[in-house]
Image (cartoon, helix red, strand yellow):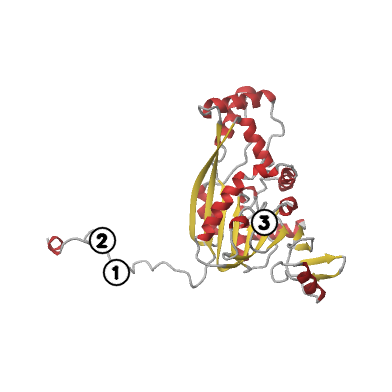
Amino acid sequence: MNNYLSSRSLRGICVCQNILKSCRIRSSALQRVECQRGILTDHVKVPSGNEFLSKSLNNFSRCTTVQRRLSGRPGGAMNVFDRTMKRQQKKWAFSLEDNNKYDYLRDEVGSRVADRVYDIARTFPLALDVGCGKSHIAEHLSKEVVERFFLTDISDSSLRLKKDCEMPTHCVMADEEFLPFKENTFDLVVSSLSLHWINDLPGALRQIHQVLKPDGVFIGAMVGGETLYELRCSLQLAELEREGGFSPHVSPYTAVTDLGNLLGQAGFNMLTVDTDEIQVHYPGMFEVMDDLQGMGESNCAWNRKSLLHRDSILAAAAIYKEMYGSEDGSVPATFEILYMIGWKPHESQAKPAKRGSADVSFADLSKIGQPESSKKS
């Protein structure tokens, strides 16, 4: 692969020029090749491996312009989450020596997203994973389904720890809120447990719709509004009792009732939205919080409380066990997973019949299969 890249670069051709809006290849042995193809500027380096690891330089003023143009809100995106803090949380989580033991939830959801890809009877020449983490979806797919895979994540640490898969992969470090790809590029876009940290979800869905080819499909999974309700309730009751008020310690999530509308507003059709619950049992509340931190899923909302008093957290642990504890002494943590499928419109797709064009009445359906004598009577 590196020899292939070297030969392409020496001829003055950027291997990603048909995919990235703008990119720059730098190597000590190669001549620097620049190509400007869009608003965002991406630096793609050729590392020692079979993938690209590229860092996007997000120019604030330019990205703000793009965000306002794609956002579903007239004034631009809401600023709920501290994206810099989220990047630091993920970097810290992936730096742990035993970070693999916290992958159980992402591996499970990634396999369920892959199952939905297998349900579509076609081969996708080029696919994109938005917020891939350690490529928890790609490891469950075969090269007969996806021929080439682009993996993007906000953290370079996760891209360096990506899991092996059958198809060739290219890693691009990019913010999920600013995808650095040209329009009509990918046949398939997937995402698993990443979109719930995005400030402008309508704008992100519009960008995903934009980079899809016509008749391309988006398959995603994100946590829903009922996620970790046990932890949320326990912390709120404890703070009300000990401090006379409470602060949000669990990030806000999207409700399943809003997801279909968001996909429709982004331009997708033939929508499918379904929910699933995954319940994990822990020895206690402190183990729940420890695993969330190890997953890089700690709260990063701007209005989060920086300090939780010792009395409040001990009271919350007792309330958690009292209200939700099992007979064996463990406590559950519920994760509501929202799955979504949306297609980019194309003329070949099935379209609903015009209103009033039906030639059979619903009243006649009850007569199907009845004897002729009963029909006449």
Q: Amino acid at mark 1?
A: Asp
Q: Amino acid at mark 2?
A: Leu
As drawn, 23 above or below 205: below
Task: Kindly report the distance in space between the C-alpha atoms of the residues bearing marks 2 and 3.
Answer: 53 Å
Please rate how many residues cluster around mark 3, counting C-alpha atoms within 10 Å: few if below 14, some from 14 to 19, many from 20: some
As drawn, 143 above or below 288: below
Instruction: Pick whichever of labels 2 and 1 is earlier in the sequence.
Output: 1
In this view, the residue farthest toward the bottom is 11
Task: Check the picture and name the quadrant holding the C terminus.
Answer: bottom left
Residue at numbered disc 3: 164
Q: Left or right: where does residue 346 sit relative to residue 310?
A: left
Q: Nearer the viewer, residue 187 or 52?
A: 52
Task: Kindly report the distance in space between the C-alpha atoms of the residues bearing marks 2 and 1.
Answer: 12 Å
Mark 3–mark 1 contact, CB under 8 Å? no
Q: Nearer the viewer, mark 2 or mark 3?
A: 3
Task: Identify the residue at image location x=56%, y=32%.
Answer: 233
Task: Kindly report the distance in space between the C-alpha atoms of the residues bearing marks 3 and 1.
Answer: 54 Å
Q: Tag 1, which secondary structure?
A: loop
Q: Nearer the viewer, mark 3 or mark 1?
A: 3
Please rate how many residues cluster around mark 1, counting C-alpha atoms within 10 Å: few if below 14, some from 14 to 19, many from 20: few
Please rate how many residues cluster around mark 2, counting C-alpha atoms within 10 Å: few if below 14, some from 14 to 19, many from 20: few
Give x and y (percent) for residue 11.
Answer: 80, 77
Residue at numbered disc 2: 365
